[in-house]
């Protein structure tokens, strides 16, 4: 199995280095790492190019979903795993991802909980995101994927149309809705990803209120038949 890792980046020169260091210390090494430059104005690109096996591509349309889609389209792997620049992949992250895809050969995607690194949210461990995954899967009718901790088969990603154009929806849940029309999504509670809680501290209203509204829009939104390509 050939595994690519995609990291969408917008001005993350400090945190990106730590993420790439963690990826360089994986028990199962990535076959390629793609950093998506989403119009960075700092030294993020220069930081990325200091690491071997890292390729930089550029997406000029601003936004996480656009950068993510660009990275996935550029990947050469059979499976593409995504994380964020402010995340720290544990040493066994890619190993567990590979094992999950091998155990579930018909799965189109694999995801797992995120663990915030800063207190007080860090004290809660995996349980808040695991509970959210259970609640979301109940209302949506299928498992979900979390942005900094997911892997998708390229063959499945190529079967769905771009799902970046509706900014009223949460991009991760929107992506899961499209993928669920192609095949099974596996959520493994043992595949963890450490990520920063800085967005909660910086914009708590957006995190708790806006994301909640986005989720309910996802619940009542259904991808149209053309969302899966012939």
Image: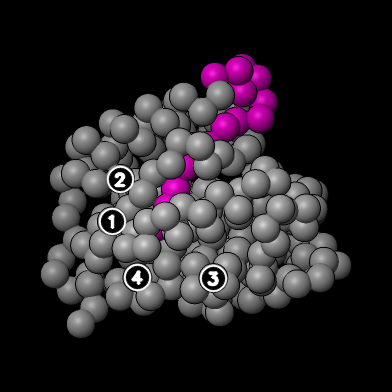
Which residue is pictured at 24% across the width and 46% down the height? Answer: 142
Q: Nearer the viewer, residue 92 or 219?
A: 92
As drawn, 194 above or below 31 = above
Q: Locate residue 210, reporting x and y percent.
A: 38, 36
Farthest-out residue, bottom: 230
Q: CA distance from mark 4 to mark 2?
A: 15 Å
Q: Earlier in the sequence, mark 1 or mark 2?
A: 2
Q: Is residue 169 above or below residue 29?
A: above
* Label 3 Cα neighbours within 10 Å, binned few <14 / some 14-19 / many ≥20: few
- The answer to whether residue 26 of the structure is visible from this angle is yes
Which of the marked residues, 3 or 4, is nearer the chain's N terminus? 3
- The residue tagged 4 is 156
Q: Are marks 1 and 4 in contact (CB under 8 Å)?
A: no
- Disc 4 packing (10 Å; few <14; some 14–19; many ≥20): many
Q: Which residue corresponds to mark 2?
A: 143
Callout 2: 10 Å neighbours few (<14), some, many (20+)? many
Marks 1 and 2, how far apart at CA: 8 Å
């Amino acid at each position: 199995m050939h595994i690519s890792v995609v990291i969408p980046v917008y001005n993350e020169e400090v945190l990106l280095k730590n993420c790439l260091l963690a990826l360089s210390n994986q028990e199962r090494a990535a076959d390629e790492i793609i950093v998506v430059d989403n119009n960075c104005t700092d030294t993020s690109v220069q930081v990325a190019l200091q690491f071997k096996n890292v390729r930089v591509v550029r997406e000029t349309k601003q936004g996480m979903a656009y950068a993510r889609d660009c990275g996935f389209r550029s990947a050469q792997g059979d499976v593409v795993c995504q994380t964020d620049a402010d995340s720290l992949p544990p040493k066994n992250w890619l190993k567990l991802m590979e094992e999950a895809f091998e155990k579930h050969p018909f799965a189109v995607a694999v995801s797992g909980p995120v663990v915030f690194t800063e207190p007080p949210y860090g004290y809660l461990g995996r349980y808040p995101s695991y509970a959210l995954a259970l609640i979301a899967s109940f209302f949506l009718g299928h498992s979900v994927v979390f942005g900094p901790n997911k892997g998708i088969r390229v063959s499945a990603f190529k079967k769905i149309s771009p799902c970046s154009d509706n900014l009223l929806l949460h991009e991760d849940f929107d992506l899961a809705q499209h993928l669920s029309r192609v095949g099974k999504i596996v959520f493994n509670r043992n595949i963890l990803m450490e990520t920063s809680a800085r967005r909660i501290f910086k914009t708590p209203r957006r995190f708790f209120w806006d994301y909640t509204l986005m989720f309910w829009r996802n619940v009542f939104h259904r991808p149209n038949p053309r969302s899966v390509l012939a």
